[in-house]
Amino acid sequence: MGIVILGLNASTIFIIAGLGELFSQKSGVINVGIEGVMSIAGLVAFIGAQTTGSIWIGMIFGVLAGGLMGLVHAFFSISLRLSQILSGLGIWLFGIGFTSYYGRAFTGPLMVPSIKTTFGLTLIFFLGIVLIFFFQFLLYKTHFGMKVRAAGEVPSVADAWGCSVIKIRYLCIIVGSMLSGLSGAYLTIIYSELWSAGVIAGRGWISLALVFSSLWIPILLLGTSFLMGILWVSMFSAQMLPGAPTFLMQMIPYSVAILSMIAYSLIRARGKTFMPSALGEPYYPED
Amino acid sequence: MKNSGVSKTVAVIIAAIVAAVVVGSVVYFAIPKGKVGKVAKLTQEDVASFFETADKETLTDLARNSIPQEILSEASKAPRKITIGAEWFSIIEGTSWTQQCQKALDWLLDEFPNLEAVVQTEVMPDNTIPVAERMIREKDADIIIANTEFMAIPLKDIKDKYPDKYFVSQTNANIERGRNWIRYYAKQYQSTYLAGLLAGALTKTNHIGVIGAMYDVVICRRINAFALGAQEVNPKVKVHMLYCGQWFDPPSEKEVAETLIDKFNCDILTQQTDSAAGVKVAQDKGVWYIGKDADFVELGWDDWDTVATSFVVNWQVIWERIVKDYMAGDQYPENLYFIGMESSVMTENGPLITIDLKTRDKLGVDSISDKAKAEAGKDVLKLIEKRRTQMINGTWDPFMKEIRASGITSWERDRGLKEGQIISPAGEMPTKEELLTSGFLVQGIIAPTS
């Protein structure tokens, strides 16, 4: 049971970061800089919590930092119509470099009391569950959700309906990045309670992969995130399996992420497409 | 007849002119100026101009001729400046290992007024040599110290290029050394043994957890001694070790710590990694923790309610010897240091031994928290003190105990050793080289197969 609780806490990072990325991608914009967003938000949240002595103020700082990075990505990819992949990579590299340099002085443990847990699970885990169902409802049962999906599938039709695709995409990216920021903040000030360069350790990239393997459906993302969280913590106890090579065990989560991408590609090769049709394409509104 | 008179006169005049030119030349070039005729009056501008244009050698001569000899003799006896170039593999903040190395360096700088240091952090194997050469070139570094083997090894490639410098490297499993290629390590296992005595007494579940970095000779040696100590006071105890994969990976260290507590029922943790992630888990879960390589309480990573004690290494005990060798101009210094509690440096508070249990300013048994002392019991505390004294006196060592194999490491499998087989009988002490290169784990340690 202990491993399950550990796994669920670990899955919180993937649930929230993945959900943010899913929401952004549903509107047609991919953000491969999610790792950089999480790094910056994690550092800002850590600094906020350390200096104010409050976990929750730190979390707010992290969310806002994530939103700011989302705004940057939106500006480059929507307003300037630059390649979304390049913009995201730029944010990733900026995030890693910025946090490696400015985060040095803050390396170490968080000197703020931990938050309470319920059955060993944090409040952020339950928030993640609520958000999953909220976005599931928002995207598939509301008029606004339909607009978001339209902006991601056929933006020209959405535009013709009177939806401002630009505004919808801006909103989705910023909100999505705020969720990524929330995930990064959770990782540094609640999950690890410690800052160091590289603390995100590839979890942003895995969250990105999980969006693909969940077929862009929030409820499925919940399941894949749970699985990934449990795999992530199980790799340590799996070391004790007779003859199990330690480093091979540590590859498991990353290998599963790659395999899920391959599986999605195979599904796509059979003609079934779940990816938003306009994902990655800049939109040019008609005059 | 009149013509011969004229010729004579002309000859005399010419001779007089030639003589005047020769004498005048001699006077002008041979005799120092100022001694002929009036003494020139020097102006302030003349003096200023002299000092602006005179070269270093002229000024040095002028000074030497002006300063009394007895003062010059005294000044020439003062030790020349020595510079240490420190290459740290990680950042200093937030790490146990490098912070302790930096403390040792700071101690040396306080101790030796003619010692200076230049520090570079986050040095990796691909830039060890460029950083060292830059320190030598720009800061005239005399002694290069690299604080971990994997990034220090490249230095051996430049030891012959700079024969008058010392290149000093922590040793892990590789004990290659040379005339000016010095390897060192401390017998940290002596303090982990003492910590093990305490842990064995404190555990109620008989399961102790170790957050390990990876399968590594240094970790094996330290945890072997830790397990030997724990088993001495509690024969039923099991020491569980899991690997994070890296020396510094806080989220993984946290996950390993939680796994050790939740899955393996460990109620005491220690680490063979470098971050504070594990001690945070111990605090949350209410289990004891033993700090590693640094005083966790002094660092502010936790308090005495969680950290029963910590074991620390005072690297300055080793480095002081190396610095003194260099200062004495020793061209063949000691090049393999593996010293422990029997060695120390003198401080204003008395001798500071190489490794010890430490919390704030308290050492040995005094460093153990009152709550842990009460739980451990007086007999164990007496044993800790006894063993510590024996090791300080050099009369006992943990590896003098009988060592039995666990059978789980490649080192043991390569030698055909199965679980329970004797590696070293009681009373026999392995050599320095054997201890530095052996990668076995003792029976009673449960760790991933490696």
Image (cartoon, coloured by chain):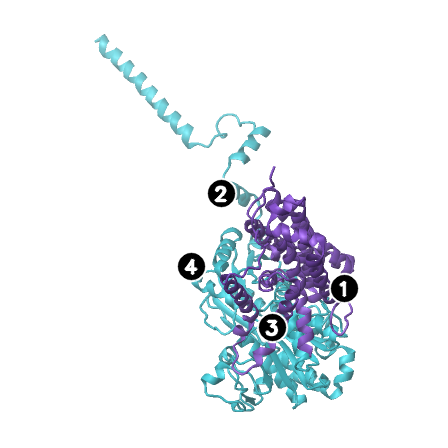
Crowding near pointer 1: few (<14 within 10 Å), some, many (20+)?
Answer: some
Type of amino acid under label 2: Glu
- Do the numbered discs 4 and 2 sit on residues whose CB atoms are within 8 Å? no
For marks 2 and 3, give the CA distance: 74 Å
Quadrant in which residue A142 is drawn: bottom right
Residue in view at x 71 percent, y 81 percent: B267
The residue labelled by disc 2 is B57
Mark 4 or mark 2, which has the lower sequence index? Answer: 2
Task: Say which of marks 1 and 2 sits in front.
Answer: 1
Q: Give the letter of the cyan chain.
A: B
The residue labelled by disc 4 is B161
Q: Is mark 4 on a helix, strand or loop?
A: loop
- The x, y position of residue A167, in whole percent, is 67, 45
Task: Say which of marks 4 and 3 sits in front.
Answer: 3
Are the residues under badges 1 and 2 in a single subunit? no
- Do the numbered discs 3 and 1 sit on residues whose CB atoms are within 8 Å? no
Which chain is mark 2 on?
A: B
